[in-house]
Amino acid sequence: MIKAILVFNNHGKPRLSKFYQYFDESLQQQIIKETFQLVSKRDDNVCNFLEGGSLIGGSDYKLIYRHYATLYFVFCVDSSESELGILDLIQVFVETLDKCFENVCELDLIFHADAVHHILSELVMGGMVLQTNMNDIMARIEEQNKLVKQEAGISAAPARAVSAVKSMNIPQQIKDIKLPDLPQAIKDFKF
């Protein structure tokens, strides 16, 4: 099972952290710091698996990571997970991010955190791998984007209607016409 997914830059600044096991916030910060120290001091030509730190569970847990440009993608998993499977999952995650943001960079993770979390939730939920097919993940993301655009169109409709009426060239006399009051019987009618 996946216990945590961490993404941090070369200076140890967390850009994404998702814990699937409860840790209080101060312990989460210590785990991120310890994980960065363990991963960052390793050579680029060594294996991408190492024993988990003392805070995340010790020898029963593994840190599986990939280093891309300025970002480390680290998955903290228990011994039941396949190291190669998780490396492939990291690759799918990064390629999906790259496809969504067109050449993903650290700033995309900062300014589009909600979209990044949505992509991650398509891959992993509750510490379990849901989907590894990038085409299926992209189809779900495109469906979500369509829904967001539809909702934005619906919520913006009243404002568009007001601006459309204001921009119409209606003579001032017509705009100033007052409608007669409704008869009292209609005002008193209860629906």
Image (spheres, rainbow, N blue to C red):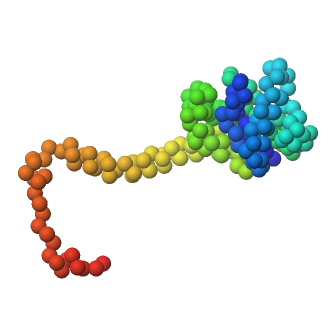
The residue drawn where x is 34% and y is 50% is: 157
Residue 68, visible in the rendered structure: no
View extreme (right): residue:
59
The residue drawn where x is 83% and y is 29% is: 38
Residue 127, horizontal then vertical, whole percent: 75, 48
Q: Is residue 176 above or below residue 78?
A: below
Residue 122, horizontal then vertical, whole percent: 65, 45
The residue drawn where x is 61% and y is 44% is: 118
Q: Is residue 10 above or below residue 180?
A: above
Q: Is residue 42 above or below residue 6?
A: above
Q: Is residue 73 left or right of residue 96?
A: right
Residue 16 falls in which quadrant of the image?
top right
Q: Is residue 11 left or right of residue 105?
A: right
View extreme (front): residue:
26
Residue 30, horizontal then vertical, whole percent: 78, 37
* Quadrant showing the C terminus: bottom left
Please tell me which residue lies in front, 68 or 176: 176
Please tell me which residue lies in front, 12 or 68: 12
